[in-house]
Image (spheres, grey):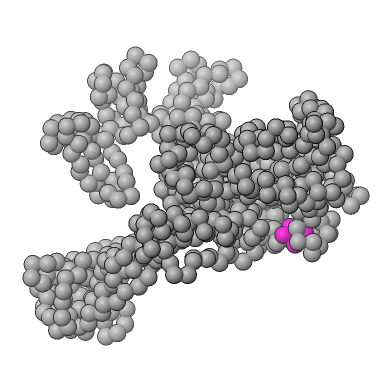
Amino acid sequence: MSQKLVIVESPAKAKTIKKYLGKDYVVEASMGHIRDLPKSQLGVNVDNNFEPKYITIRGKGDLIDNLKKQAKKSDIVYLATDPDREGEAISYHLAEILKLDPKQKVRIEFNEITKDAVKNSIKHARPINEHLFDAQQARRILDRLVGYEISPILWKNVKWGLSAGRVQSAALKLICDRETEIGNFESKEYWTIEALLTKAAKKIKTRLSTKNGKKVEISNAKEAEAIRKELEKGEFRVKSLKKGQKAKNPLPPFITSTLQQEASRRLNFQTKRTMGIAQRLYEGVDVKGHGTVGLITYMRTDSVRISNEAQAMAKDFILDTFGPEYYPSVPKTYKGKKGAQDAHEAIRPSNVALTPDVVKGSLKDEELKLYRLIWERFLASQMESAKIDTVSLEVENGSYILRASGSSVAFDGFMKLYEYKNDDEEENTMIPDLEEGDILKKDKVLPEQHFTQPPPRFTEASFVKTLEELGIGRPSTYAPTISTLLDRQYVEREKKNLLPTELGKIVNSIMSEHFKDVVDVEFTASIEEKLDLIEEGGTKWTDVVESFYIPLKKDIEEAESKVSKITIEDEVTDEICEKCGKHFVIKNGRFGKFLACSGYPECTNTKPIVEKLDVPCPKCTDGEVLARKSRKGRRFYGCSRYPECDYVSWYEPVKEKCAVCGGLQYKKYTKKDGAYLECSVETCKNKVKLEK
């Protein structure tokens, strides 16, 4: 009996594919890359056309022997690694090790792991795409040259174990530059004035807009008070009332960056977690009644395109589930950003009939949340636009104009399934039926002081969006880049925000002074464009590497003589070590900051950093509540007498008791309600909104 061998990257993928191919096929996993540049040396011959020295990755010997054995017994070998540059490189190295002819039809790829997609890929087997491999090889060598040539300068002058990176260093500069911008920001005072008006007992909130046709700008309390008095004296008359209707269009299906951003906003998932969950959904999950199923398409993509088959599948589902009025007369298509790699589809469910409700008993909670997000976004992208009735109101008071706008949903369309709010959508005000010339009764005229705010710190979501907009990295690199910055302790999280550490600022300062090209955003983006050009066959990979390395080598030679030794002083605290009497200092460890005795190595005493809340422990009353951080960096609250008292909470308790029942209150926050106190007593649950 003839045997056919299919090699994929992971055991989960192998299990799913084996089910579709039957007994004539053996499916094995390469467990990712099998060859790479050596860790112990540069591994690139810069004097001989940048020839790479690939070696078998340590620990993969037995796996390779098994693959060779299975390949010998097989009539044909198919390389079914992921459909991207990294996947092509793994296939190339597998072909070399297994002595397969890369020009023969040994390469198969599929965007989704379904029976039809897998079987169809075998019918359309192709040779290995050497341009795609060359693009990956160029990227790998460029990254190696930056990492292995610059990092020793950081080890010598700052601290052992530091690293530089082609994408990583440019990304770090963005975070450091934002922090500098925030530090240099000068806040300016300004005022706004709102007028609460009424008509037939119905309130309308208006905002002062113009005076004599020019925008009103109020810079201090004196000006605000003068205008308030003028408005108080005057009469509020409806100048114009415009009614209209506008379409609100659905968003396109997810690409890698938008999935990471939305999962961060809606689910509070970090980018690394999002990609790990998406990988499992793509490779296959055991769904009751269906066996192992790949639930979503490939999750590393920057294309918003979907296949005709997927569009037809969505159409049938929408018509059957929601009715014909929810399907557009012309199917929705979306235009991707310039330079998007359109070979792949957007991220979508492989089979829309496997609804979140159908699969929920088979998925972990986090898997179900992400799958629901992907499923709803895809279906909504193919639904009819929503219709929004709008009202624009202008109220005249002397030479002043006040404005308000309102809207209501005339037809929900895609919003029946998936709602979103644009950043520029104004606060909605309910506006009653009015006529031009109506006199509105004054309720209150309210001046309010504000101060201009500095640009916000990056969250993971906004950082991914910025990396994508600037062309730094590709869908596969966003999550690893953020993880590297955090792992190297160049950046730390404060709640959701990304802040540069002192170490990160020092490294960025050295890189910015001595390696301007490496950290330059436009230069880094231009390299990505050149890698795309290699993939398209438009240029040689060696030419791209050479044009990058010649100026880099010069910078390295200069930096080796010019970079000065920098000593990073530990931050000394007031806390005294109970073992030796010396001060504790703050150190950075694998799980964040901790206290260590300054007498090290003679004294090895360490302890976690805790924050006292001045709140008695609600369980034992003898201890006090301390704020701590979990190993994953999440803030939690526990008793100072632990382990004698095991009180613990994710929410911050407060001293003030509930005004209704006298129970313990916790600080909580939601996007809808903002910050508030909530009573912990189940039968009470009284809420009190907190001021900003």
Residue 154 appears at what percent x and percent y?
70, 42
Specify the farthest residue to the right. 48
In this picture, residue 180 sits left or right of residue 205: right
Q: Is residue 250 above or below residue 643?
A: below
Specify the farthest residue to the left. 200
Residue 223 appears at what percent x and percent y?
24, 73
Q: Nearer the viewer, residue 166 or 69?
A: 69
Magenta stretch, residue numbers: 530-534
Q: Residue at x 34, y 14 (%)?
A: 644
Q: Residue at x 42, y 57 (%)?
A: 318
Q: Quadrant of the N terminus?
A: top right
Q: Nearer the viewer, residue 371 or 455?
A: 371
Whether the magenta-drawn stretch holds residue 533 is answered as yes
In this picture, residue 183 sits left or right of residue 26: left
Q: Is residue 222 visible?
A: no
Q: Is residue 347 visible?
A: yes
In this picture, residue 79 sits left or right of residue 666: right
Whether the magenta-drawn stretch holds residue 527 is answered as no
Q: Residue at x 47, y 20 (%)?
A: 577
Q: Is residue 292 above or below residue 338?
A: above
Q: Which image quadrant for residue 237?
A: bottom left
Q: Which image quadrant for residue 91?
A: top right
Residue 267 appears at what percent x and percent y?
42, 44
Q: Nearer the viewer, residue 149 or 23?
A: 23
Q: How many marks?
A: 0
Residue 449 appears at what percent x and percent y?
26, 63
Secondary structure mainly formed by the magenta segment = helix
Q: Is residue 176 above or below residue 620?
A: below
Q: Residue at x 11, y 70 (%)?
A: 198
Q: Is residue 60 above or below residue 116?
A: above
In this picture, residue 221 sits left or right of residue 277: left
